[in-house]
Image (tube, rainbow, N blue to C red):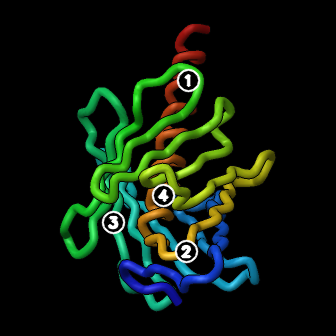
Amino acid sequence: MLRRGTRHAKGRRMKLFIKQKVFSWGDKFHVYDENQNDLLYVEGEVFTFGKKLHVYDAGGNELAFVHQKVWSFLPRYFISRNGVDIAEVVKQFTFFRQEYSVNGPGWTVDGDFWAHEYEITSDGRSVASISKRWFTWGDTYEIDIADGADVVLALCVVLIIDAVLQQQSNNSATTMHNNN
């Protein structure tokens, strides 16, 4: 079971899998380990301005809250614990790859052209590797988290990447529909 601010044991990397529930009101994700044990779940608020996601442990305790700053030129999200913002994630303006800055812990996120492979780094060292699976029913991510890294914070960064990609996909679908 993961707790608020969890840093997993030294000596090995932790692998988590995030699976989006397809047919539900609002965003819902299940987070499980490589043995298929449910560790966390994520629920999004419905009918709100901006994306709002709550991260819970298996006992129903809120570990983190992700909320979007609505009126911003570039996508901007905040991660909170106990009502206090601990990180700000901002998508950078780039053309051929994905890049985010995570202010607070000082992380950088670099993604590939296809927006399926990401690396979170801090001072040049890997914090987590993220891989979005191709051709799945609902978005599915695999996260390989480094020793001593904040597991819940890394998970929140992945949720924000997913939210930005979903927003970009919705915007392009709207643009294509309006042009026809």
Query: Which one is in front in this view, the residue at disc 4 or the one at disc 2?
Result: 2
* Relative image position of residue 82 (x, y in whole percent): 23, 75
- Which residue sits at x=34%, y=30%? 74
Quarter of the image that includes the C terminus = top right
N-terminal label among 3 and 4: 4
Which residue extends farthest right? 135
Gap between marks 2 and 1 measured at Cα? 38 Å
The quarter of the displayed image where residue 70 is located: top left
Is residue 165 visible in the rendered image? The answer is yes
Gap between marks 3 and 1 measured at Cα? 27 Å
Which mark identifies residue 65?
3
Packing grade of label 4 (10 A; few <14, some 14-19, many >=20) is some
* Relative image position of residue 65 (x, y in whole percent): 33, 66
> Label 1 is placed on what type of residue?
Ser
Q: Out of 145 and 27, give the one closest to the viewer.
A: 145
Residue at numbered disc 4: 26
Residue at numbered disc 2: 147
N-terminal label among 2 and 1: 2
Is residue 47 visible in the rendered image? The answer is no
Q: Are marks 4 and 2 in contact (CB under 8 Å)?
A: no
Which mark identifies residue 134?
none
> Label 3 is placed on what type of residue?
Phe
N-terminal label among 4 and 1: 4
